[in-house]
Image (cartoon, rainbow, N blue to C red):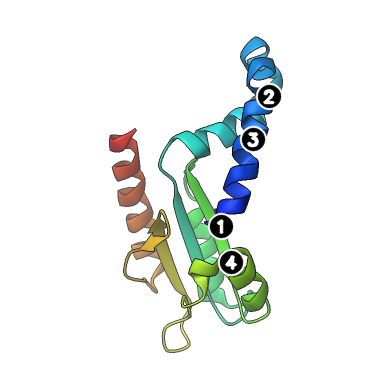
Amino acid sequence: MTGDQKCAHLRDRLMEAFVSEVDAHPTAFSQFLIALQLVLYPTQEVVLAGRNYRDSRLQEMVAATRMRFYPQTTVMLRTDALKERMTTLAPFTESQEPIQGVPAAYVCESFACRAPVTEPTVLALQLDSAYQELRRRK
């Protein structure tokens, strides 16, 4: 999610430490298996960039990301209030801003992003398309 190699190394060590327990009792480790899926298969990141979380267009974009279940997708919100923390957590989001003051959505894969969109309906189509591409590569 962040692209931070130090975190990735720690994640890998954690996975190795628990692999035998997970293998022996998979139903007891459902969240761990979800995390493993995020490691083993391609993922996508969606950054919703807006000035204020209360903006109705930004809320519509949030709703568009919740319309379907995208298990390989992480949605991140980048508002003026969260900008510095988001850039620290996920540096690839630094340049992702609203477009001419209008909330924008950036659909990314492995931190490489498609052209931003500003319409919730276009975002929904882009998410469906990106998810189908991920499924084909599994």
Q: Residue at x 55, y 32 (%)?
A: 36
Mark 2, residue position: 18
Q: Amino acid at mark 2?
A: Phe
- Which residue position is annotated with label 1? 2
Residue 53 placement, left or right of 129: right
Calculate the distance from the C-alpha at mark 1 to the C-alpha at mark 3: 17 Å
Mark earlier in primary sequence (4, 1)? 1
Amino acid under label 1? Answer: Thr
Q: Position of residue 14 (x, y in %)?
A: 67, 34
Disc 4 secondary structure class? strand
SS of the residue under disc 1 = loop
- State the image quarter where residue 85 is shown: bottom right
Q: CA distance from mark 3 to mark 4?
A: 29 Å
Residue reaching furthest to the bottom: 100
Residue 125 vs residue 23, the one in the foreground: 23
C-alpha gap between disc 2 and disc 1:
23 Å
In the rendered structure, are the residues bearing label 3 and label 4 in contact, judged by CB atoms less than 8 Å apart? no
Q: Quadrant of the C terminus?
A: top left
Discs 2, 1 touching: Cβ within 8 Å: no
Using residue 109 as the reference point, say whether residue 26 is left or right of it: right
Residue 66 seen by the camera: no
Q: Is residue 122 visible?
A: yes
Counting residues from the start of the chain, the first of labels 3 and 4 encountered is 3
Location of mark 4 (residue): 77
The residue under label 3 is: 13
